[in-house]
Image (cartoon, rainbow, N blue to C red):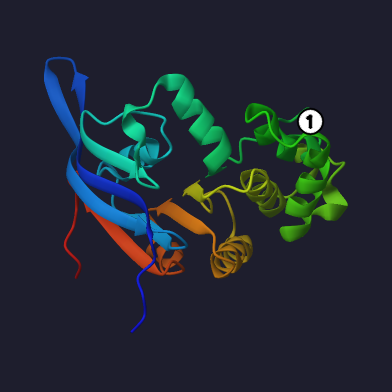
Amino acid sequence: MTSLPAPLIELEDVRKTYRMGDEDVHALAGVTLTIGSGEFVAVVGPSGSGKSTLMHLLGLMDRPTSGRLSFGGQDVSRLSSSAQATHRARKLGFVFQSFNLLPRLSVMDNVLLPLSYARDGGKDGRRRAAEALERVGLSHRARHRPGQLSGGERQRAGIARALVNRPELILADEPTGNLDGQNVERILELFRELHSGGQTIVLVTHDTNVAASARRQIRMQNGRVAPAA
């Protein structure tokens, strides 16, 4: 019998309500789910389904209105703002659709940024950044600036930046949305390789072809997890 992965993320009846004028908008309406350590999960659904809100909560960029969000058994939704910032810096890696690279910094210095936020790395930081760039096939571009890279190379630099702090979880928000077909496949292959190496990945996408690369799909609908088809 194949053993199930140990839970890394657990959500119990998580709800998020926003006040819009005179109305309450229920972005999440009672989400309960578990994501195991080492899983590669795609969160899919149409605009307004709650997938982006779920990503923001997992990344501790917002707090649930009610419910429990645990990471490694700890209820992180109730941590102080400073403790949440430390958690983000040390345990999470982020990959964005728009790359979010600082244009005046070299690729190497962009990759080093999470270590400065986490106050980690020290003399070891440049070696770790170089290893991350090698892992994504960008060692030869370390001294270039983002504007000198192709779209696919910029996204690979973004993934290297997400990897440099050796995170327990990578959150990827529409990471292929600005790429052409060939670069989409290269980025997805990189995610598959990271997953094979034991990395936990949660990828948010509206593209069913991109979601098919994940080992499990969570479909959001009207602020809830839709039943499996």
Element class at badge 1: loop
Q: Outermost residue toward the top?
A: 21
Tell me the quadrant of the picture where the C terminus can be found: bottom left
Q: Measuring 60% from the left and 68% from the top, which residue is drawn there?
A: 193
Residue 159's spot in the image, x, y percent?
Answer: 63, 50
Q: Is 195 displayed left or right of 69 in the figure? A: right
Residue 121, by quadrant, is: top right
In this view, 209 is above or below 159: below
Which amino acid lies under the numbered mark 1 shown in the image of this protein?
A: Leu
On the image, the x and y values in percent for residue 68 come to 24, 38
Residue 33 in the figure: left or right of residue 23: right
- Quarter of image, res 89: top right
Q: Nearer the viewer, residue 82 or 136?
A: 82
The residue drawn where x is 48% and y is 47% is: 171
Q: Which residue, as the protein is rendered here, is positioned at the far bottom?
A: 1
Q: Is residue 47 positioned above or below 87 on the image? A: below
Q: Specify the quadrant that holds the N terminus.
A: bottom left
Q: Is residue 82 above or below residue 159?
A: above
Q: Is residue 96 visible?
A: no
Q: Position of residue 7 (x, y in %)?
A: 36, 57
State the count of labels.
1
Residue placed under numbered mark 1 in the picture:
105
Residue at image point 68% right, 45% down: 164
